[in-house]
Image: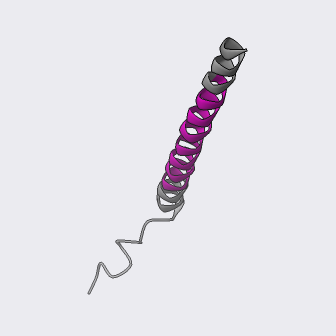
């Protein structure tokens, strides 16, 4: 009985740590994805026309 309880507690502890780990990984991946999308959006914009006022 004690061994069963010990194994159950170890499984519960492992599940808790895994949930916390994957929550941190998910939040980090979300932030990284937003950063990459914002960076790609800035790169896709047309650059300003430098020759528009060249004769003035």
Residue 34: percent from the left, percent from the top? Answer: 54, 55
Magenta segment includes 42: no
* Residue for point 69% across, 23% down: 8
Q: Give the answer, above or below, for where 49 lies relative to 4.
A: below
Residue 18: percent from the left, percent from the top? Answer: 59, 32
Q: How many marks?
A: 0
| Quarter of the image where the N terminus is located | top right
Q: For the view shown, which residue lies furthest in the bottom direction?
A: 56
Residue 50 falls in which quadrant of the image? bottom left
1 to the left or right of 16: right
Which of 55 and 12 lies nearest the eye of the viewer?
A: 12
Which of 31 and 12 lies nearest the eye of the viewer?
A: 12
Q: Give the answer, above or below, for where 15 lies relative to 55.
A: above
Magenta segment includes 28: yes
| Quarter of the image where the C terminus is located | bottom left
Task: Specify the segment rendered in magenta.
Answer: 11-36
* Residue for point 41% across, 71% down: 48
Residue 42: percent from the left, percent from the top? Answer: 48, 61
Q: Give the answer, above or below, for where 52 lies relative to 14.
A: below
Instruction: Please identify the dominant SS of the magenta region.
Output: helix
Residue 46: percent from the left, percent from the top? Answer: 50, 65
* Residue for point 54% across, 60% down: 41
Which of 30 and 24 lies nearest the eye of the viewer?
A: 24
* Image color mode: one colour
Q: For the view shown, which residue lies furthest in the left direction?
A: 56
Q: For the view shown, which residue lies furthest in the front direction?
A: 1
* Residue for point 67% across, 16% down: 2
């Amino acid at each position: 009985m004690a061994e069963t309880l010990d194994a159950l507690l170890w499984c519960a502890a492992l599940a808790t740590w895994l949930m916390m780990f994957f929550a941190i990984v998910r939040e980090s991946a979300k932030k990284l994805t937003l950063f990459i999308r914002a960076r790609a959006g800035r790169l896709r914009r047309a650059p300003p026309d430098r020759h528009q006022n060249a004769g003035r």
